[in-house]
Amino acid sequence: MNHWQYNSRHALKDAKQCNNFFQTTAFKDQSFPIKVPLEFANLIDKSNPDDPLLKQVANSHSLIKGLDFNPSPLADEKHSPVNGLIHKYPNRVLLITTRVCTIHCQYCFRQNFDYASHDAINNWNSIKNYIHQHTDINEVILSGGDQLSLSDDKLHWLISNIEQIPHIKTLRIHSRTLVVTPSRITDQLVKLLNSSKLNVVVVLHSNHANELSGEFVKRINKLKQVTLLNQSVLLKGVNDSVQALSDLSLRLFDAGVLPYYLHLLDKVSGAEHFLVDDECAKELHQQLKKNLSGYLVPRLVRDENGEFKAWIG
Ligand code: SF4
């Protein structure tokens, strides 16, 4: 077993464990289970109940009623012509490769997703046929869950198969795992991504500078042949300040990663307390533009009915 697999297996997984570890009462057992990997847990300041990392995984807040939140706000399933594959845009498809995540983020819009019906690895033959028939598709996006919770061998199998489809030029990997469990950046993974014949783009999901440890920076620098971008979610109490967003952009840039998107919250039930309203978001974005060089300012966007809507802040 690799070091990262050991770390993943020993993540904090219930309220009692978490409340003991963090010396808090911020966790309770609910239908969306708790999962906090130890590498992430160790970055949390236990003496600070408002720690921005703690807030993303804790779940005992009081519910806010009356907002238009729902269990599955983006309804990805509507765009799935083949199980395990989402096709919203002409040139690219997204594959649901696993239901497993390294961490459970309490704002996750996929927390009620029907994973049982979507398994791109088990359904690979149908997916391969679909992509072969649609020659407009030039990019495959791996998603989940988090596909980097798969073993290196499984990833190797999947990427090799994608490489064999002639019109696929780009492989994009969206992952929070590399940030919250840097030990996942194994030599084998580095070799696999650096040596692919596809253009490889890794979009990290980091929301706060405190998540980007020295170990993460050291390891992510090994992905020399990979385009590294980041997307964040704008979360009340976590990163809804000019200081927090500026620090994140600067820390990402130090690590060789460009800030790409800042998403407005997807309105999933249970995440109401994270909502930053549109006016505040636009104001923050304006301030960010004044504080940072243009290439460090992520685009402020919202996903609506499967379409990105860029906001001009
Ligand atoms: S890592 Fe991504 S998919 Fe997994 S729980 Fe967090 S937001 Fe959801």
Image (spheres, grey):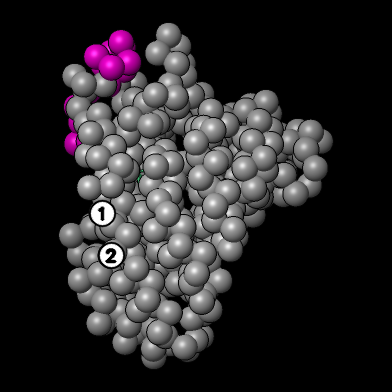
Looking at the rendering, the quadrant in which ligand 1 lies is top left
Dot 1 alpha-carbon crowd within 10 angstroms: few under 14, some 14 to 19, many 20 or more: some
Q: CA distance from mark 1 to mark 2?
A: 14 Å
Please count the marks in the image.
2
At horizontal 81% and vertical 36% (from top left) the residue drawn is: 290
Helix, strand or loop at label 2? It is helix
Q: Position of residue 293 (x, y in %)?
A: 80, 42
Residue occupying image coordinates x 67% and y 26%: 243
Q: Position of residue 148 (x, y in %)?
A: 36, 54
In the picture shown, does residue 43 fall above or below 167? Answer: above
Circle 2 Cα neighbour tier, 10 Å, few/some/many (<14 / 14–19 / ≥20)? few
Numbered circle sitting on residue 278? none
For mark 1, give the secondary structure. Answer: loop
Q: Position of residue 263 (x, y in %)?
A: 55, 46
What type of secondary structure mainly makes up the magenta span?
Answer: loop
Q: Nearer the viewer, mark 1 or mark 2?
A: 2
Query: Going 40% across and 31% down the picture, which residue do you hit?
Result: 40
Front-most of residues 263 and 187: 187
The numbered dot on residue 154 is: 2
User: The disc labelled 1 sits on which kind of residue?
Assistant: Arg
Look at the image and tell me in which quarter the C terminus lies.
top right
Magenta highlight on residue 25: yes
Residue at which label 1 appears: 99
Residue 153 or 146: which is nearer the viewer?
153
From the viewer's perspective, tell me whether residue 258 is left or right of residue 2. Answer: right
- Answer yes or no: is residue 235 visible: no
Disc 2 residue type (three-letter) = Lys
Residue 19, position in %: x, y? 26, 16
User: Does 124 appear above or below 48?
Assistant: below
Where 143 falls versus 284 (above or below)?
below
Boundaries of the magenta span: 19-33
Residue 291 visible in the shown view: yes
